[in-house]
């Protein structure tokens, strides 16, 4: 059964009607990600500076944000 957490809906692939990728598709996508990672590393050798936090911070401001959560509540 789908579950909603912090405004996001989590489902199994079967519930979402998504077919699992084939081994060939996984390899093709892996190759694409490896190429993109190489380009990022070439642009910035600093491992810490790869993407702005706005592109991956999805818990900020939610009940799962450790900076805003009140542990005594």
Image (cartoon, helix red, strand yellow):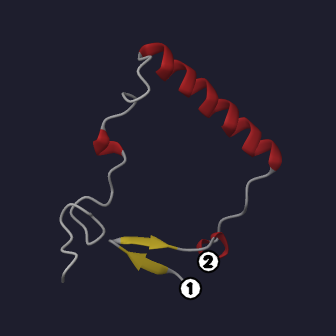
Q: Which mark is residue 27?
A: none
Placement of 35 over or under 70, stated as above or below: above
Q: Position of residue 16 (x, y in %)?
A: 59, 72
Q: CA distance from mark 2 to mark 1?
A: 7 Å
Q: Is residue 68 left or right of residue 34?
A: left
The foreground one among 27 and 38 is 38
Q: Position of residue 58 (x, y in %)?
A: 33, 57
Quadrant of the image for the N terminus?
Answer: bottom right
The crowding category of the residue bearing disc 1, from other C-alpha atoms within 10 Å (few below 14, some 14 to 19, many at least 20), is: few
Placement of 27 over or under 4, stated as above or below: above
Q: Which mark is residue 15?
A: 2
Q: Secondary structure at mark 2?
A: helix
Which residue occupies the extreme right position in the image? Answer: 23
Quadrant of the image for the C terminus?
Answer: bottom left
Mark toward the viewer: 2 or 1: 1
Write down the residue under mark 1. 1
């Amino acid at each position: 059964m789908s579950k909603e957490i912090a405004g996001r809906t989590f489902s199994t692939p079967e519930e979402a009607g998504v077919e699992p990728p084939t081994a060939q598709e996984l390899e093709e996508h892996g190759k694409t990600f490896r190429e993109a990672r190489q380009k990022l590393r070439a642009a910035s050798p600093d491992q810490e500076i790869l993407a702005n936090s706005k592109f991956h911070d999805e818990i900020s401001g939610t009940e799962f944000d450790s900076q805003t959560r009140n542990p005594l509540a």
